[in-house]
Image: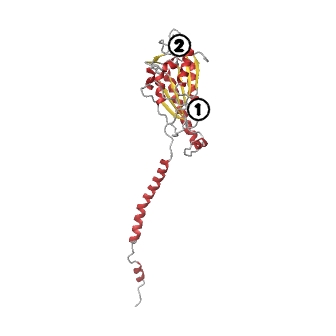
Amino acid sequence: MAKSPYSRRRGGYGKRRGPSLLKKLLLWLALILIPIIALGSGGYLAAQYLGREQIDTAYCYTRPDQHQAAIFVDFSLTHQISPSQRRDLVNTFVQSFEGMPPNGKLSVFTTAQEGTSSVNVPVFALCKPAKTPQEQERLGAPASSAPKLVRQHGEAMATFRAFLGDLIAKSQDSAHIAASSPILEQIQGISRYRFASPLSKLTLFTDGLNNSAVGQFCVKQGHLPRFETFASRPEYRFIKPDDFNGADIYILLVEQRSLPNDVLPFCTTAELRGWWVSFFEGNGAGNVRLTPLGYGAGQ
């Protein structure tokens, strides 16, 4: 009997076998593992990124040998200074910041109303970031491209200029002028402030006329004896600063009138200048340089 021509075709339409159980298991396993592997890789990369040293919000890398500079501004007199003295103040800030090495940190202290407290803290602090890959490498900081470093340096400079502009504006605003001038107490606070590394340089913009409970310089008789005599008084221990450990001190002494005069009858200009040099030398400073800023010079 001849076979039907459709018999093979019917055989061809027999029930097909589905994927084996093993194949299904492998498929499910792949669907589960692929996201896990992807997440794991992303997590590893994130961990690697987070593990890298990051520059902080003040553009600083923490280093034990970081250059630390500080500026103190006496706000009891800034509203009275001449245009030339105000330029001196601006130039002091610019030269201090731009003159620091890469990653150097500048901290600013003032006697402005909002800047004075029993525990002295900076009203502003900012680092000067590296500008080139070579500077970045010398810091031992993570490698970065030249364009990124230039942009970062520019951002820090813009932050610095904005602060300086605000400081100069406040220095002429009566709302921020200090009612008293506790210079000695402020210097003690700066000496006790916990910088990330030892203080390298302190610059002071002041008239040197301390006016607080410990002394009213040149106003009251006997309040400005020779420093050695002043330091022997019992009350001195309450305002004696911590040792400056060789930090360089730059005193920009704002002078508006010759001493003595009718308002400040109990000291001479030479006595006031010499007192401050002796004060810092007697408290462990390195080089002490005093620059008188005359009222009328350069107007």
Q: Compared to 4, does 132 lie above or below?
A: above
Quarter occupied by the C terminus:
top right
Q: Quadrant of residue 157?
A: top right
| Residue 238: % across, % down | 43, 24
| Residue 115: % across, % down | 45, 26
- Callout 2 secondary element: loop
Residue under label 2, please give it: 267
- The tag earlier along the polypeptide, 1 or 2, is 1
- Callout 1 secondary element: helix
Label 1 vs label 2, nearer the camera: 2
- Mark 1 vs 2: CB contact within 8 A: no
| Residue 220: % across, % down | 47, 12
**Residue shown at the point (55%, 20%) measured from the top left:** 253
Taking depth in this image into account, of 194 and 117 the one nearest to the observer is 194
Q: Compared to 21, does 149 lie above or below?
A: above
Report if residue 45 is visible in the image. yes
Residue under label 1, please give it: 98
Query: Mark number for residue 5?
Result: none
Q: Amino acid at mark 1?
A: Glu
Taking depth in this image into account, of 78 and 280 the one nearest to the observer is 280
Q: Quadrant of residue 11?
A: bottom left
